[in-house]
Amino acid sequence: MQHSSIPSFVLYGEKSGDNVPEFAHIETIATRSALYDWEISPHRHLRSVQALLLSNGQVEFRCDDLVRHLCAPCYMIVPIGSVHGFRFTPETSGHVMTLSAGFTSRATGSNDPLLRLLTQGACGTVPEANVARVSWLCDELLNCQADWRAPQPMFMALAEALVRSLPLPIQDETLDEERLVAFRRLIETHLREHCSVSWYARRLGITAKTLNRTCQRSLGCTPTELIHARLILEARRLLAFTNATIAQVSEDLGFSDASYFSRFYARLTGNRPRCDRMPNDGHSLRAWAMPRP
């Protein structure tokens, strides 16, 4: 998609307000989403950050290459310029708050969690202890909103309190670890089905590109290489600890053709399967390793 083809709004579907230097706006999710059959198409805000708070319902949230399915009570922070879209379940309730770029100046410094939330974005569950406060703040913001093109100090103070009531974004390292744990679990469950990387990514709620980047960053390998390494490890276990024939090992691992399995095995290990039958003492297994955890 070309840069110029991505729709850009101050408020979704509206072109007004382009010349307003400072603004702050809040409305219910239903106010706008119900007009579009509860689906907000991909777009971006070049001059504002957006916070969405769901008190009831579910949403499919897309932001750049992130895809998440969230259930209320949940939140989403969309940084300036990010391409994002939403698909809500009908009758979802909650609020959408849009704040001009200058709102980030309320941060007390570069280490202020407020700045991280607004510039990095985040999404997740609203902590149970904060649900009532978030709900009250949203209602108060809606009640005291006057002219969104000239936000009043009380509105801005309440908006800051609302953002500060939300959890910090998970650090990349922690998020990578969680994704890899879930990915490995899926591999174990579906190893013999030979699912595509895209299939795994969809089950994880992310794109194939994000899954690839996560594996490269943490393991130094691609998702496909991780899946293949697990297949080879299982094949070697079967060859070492069972009396199964090559054809039976191939079938057990989901290969439809034994000769293809042999070629696959040779390509990844440098040996034909029959060359890797070993004494049943297990010592050689110590040399077999998947990519570093």
Image (cartoon, rainbow, N blue to C red):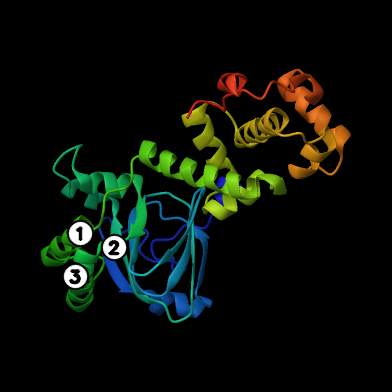
Give the x, y percent position of residue 209. 57, 41
Report the front residue among 289 and 123.
Answer: 289
Does residue 150 show up? Answer: no
Q: Are marks 1 and 3 in contact (CB under 8 Å)?
A: yes
Report the front residue among 203 and 89.
Answer: 203
Q: Which residue is mark 1?
A: 165
Identify which residue is drawn at 66% across, 31% down. 237
Circle 1 crowding by C-alpha within 10 Å: few under 14, some 14–19, many from 20: some
Q: Earlier in the sequence, mark 1 or mark 3?
A: 3
Task: Tell me the mark number nearer the camera, choosing from 2 and 3.
Answer: 2
Q: Say above or below: 6 vs 224.
A: below
Q: Are marks 1 and 2 in contact (CB under 8 Å)?
A: yes
Q: Say above or below: 68 vs 231.
A: below
Circle 3 crowding by C-alpha within 10 Å: few under 14, some 14–19, many from 20: some
Q: Which residue is mark 3?
A: 137
Give the x, y percent position of residue 293. 47, 30
Report the front residue among 290 and 287.
Answer: 287
Q: Which residue is mark 2?
A: 126
Circle 2 crowding by C-alpha within 10 Å: few under 14, some 14–19, many from 20: many
